[in-house]
Amino acid sequence: MSEFVYRTGRGIYIMASWHLFHQSRIQTFMLRRAGAFSIYREGMDRTALNTAVEMLEKAERPLVVFPEGVISRTNDRLNTLLDGVAIMARSAAKKRAKLNPPGHVVIHPVAIRYKFEGDLAKSLEPVLEDLEHRLSWQSQKHLNLASRIAKIGQGLLTLKEIEYMGHSQEGPIYDRMQRLINHLLVPLEDEWLDGRHDGHIVARVKGIRTAILPDMVKGDLSEEERTRRWKQLADVYLAQQLAFYPPDYIASNPTPERLLETVERFEEDLTDKSRVHRPIRAIIRVGEPIEVSPTRDRESRGEGDPLMQKIEDQLKSMLGIKNGNEATPKTTVEAAPLASA
């Protein structure tokens, strides 16, 4: 988005997770200079929401919001969009409608696609060697790249099954992952959310984190309880990361981008860091404006939000997603999309 700002000559405001402002003084300084302000995602951060609405009301700069709410590294998929975008936009639209003359609020969906343009095997080889070494394996160079990556993924999943469930599971990879995710989340939902187990994985994780974190932020817990909750937070994070490994993502269409981002997730999940692989070219597409009504249609209440549906439809169109949430596999290698609005 900084390149977009540079080429258009128009500054932006960016809503960013609060934890990014607590990692280093330099990063905090740079984020603020770039127009970023923090939002506490694990609760109703009314200050951040009011700030966002005020920015839209004054219309000095566009406001950038990432509606997926998480970084998934699955760029051929559009994850479930969170409805905070619609809430902020409608609140601002109500205020701008009272201006003289009346003002408006519009949303431009923005789709970002990237293409890896380097030597994929050469770039990934050091990472794969390190991952295999961590698994105490000999080098698996005899396998093709896709098979080698898939084998590492199966090995990592098996280790987590043994850690949390006592032994490796049987059946298709997707079923095994879902069992492990529920093994992690269901006991915590029983404890913290009165047994509610509905919604997509990101929403389920957010609900648990929202319940666990407030007392930890206040600092009123014993050391033993604080340690227990840190363990629970690590478990819900693992469940969320597991959900970002789509079934057959490589097998169905092993493009360089899908192989690259899968290895990046492996490394980041294991080490909390990921090496940069170059060169990568990004393509930014800005969608047509969607005018925001100050009110939501009565007919749509109880159903999906029509405003969010318009945003999703436009993003899918720009990203080449025709059915479901994943881009249609292609026989030729093209850039994999990353969607944000």
Image (cartoon, rainbow, N blue to C red):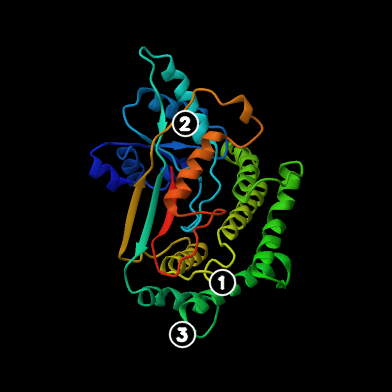
Task: Answer with mark 2 or mark 1, whichever residue precedes in sequence.
Answer: 2
Q: Please tell me in which quadrant of the rendered image residue 44 appears.
A: top right
Amino acid under disc 2: Ala
Amino acid under disc 3: Lys
Give the structural element (helix, strand or loop) at label 3: loop
Of residues 177 and 31, the one nearer the viewer is: 177
Q: Residue at x 28, y 36 (%)?
A: 11
What distance separates the C-alpha of mark 2 from that of mark 3? 50 Å
Task: Provide the residue designation for mark 3.
Answer: 141
Say whether marks 3 and 1 touch (CB < 8 Å): no
Task: Work out which quarter of the rendered image holds the C terminus and state it.
Answer: top left
Residue lying farthest bottom?
142
Q: Is residue 126 above or below residue 34?
A: below
What distance separates the C-alpha of mark 3 from that of mark 1? 15 Å
Task: Answer with mark 2 or mark 3, whichever residue precedes in sequence.
Answer: 2
Of residues 327 and 123, the one nearer the viewer is: 327
Give the structural element (helix, strand or loop) at label 1: helix
Amino acid under disc 1: Gly
What distance separates the C-alpha of mark 2 from that of mark 1? 39 Å
Crowding near the residue tagged with mark 3, few <14, some 14–19, many ≥20 C-alpha atoms within 10 Å: few
Crowding near the residue tagged with mark 1, few <14, some 14–19, many ≥20 C-alpha atoms within 10 Å: some
* Between marks 2 and 3 in the image, the one whose residue lies nearer the viewer: 3
Crowding near the residue tagged with mark 2, few <14, some 14–19, many ≥20 C-alpha atoms within 10 Å: some
Task: Provide the residue designation for mark 2.
Answer: 48
Q: Is residue 116 left or right of residue 17?
A: left
Q: In the image, residue 196 lies at what x, y percent? A: 74, 43
Task: Provide the residue designation for mark 1.
Answer: 153
Q: In the image, residue 312 lies at what x, y percent? A: 50, 44
Q: Residue at x 46, y 69 (%)?
A: 259
Q: Is residue 142 above or below residue 262?
A: below
Q: In the image, residue 158 lies at what x, y percent? A: 64, 72
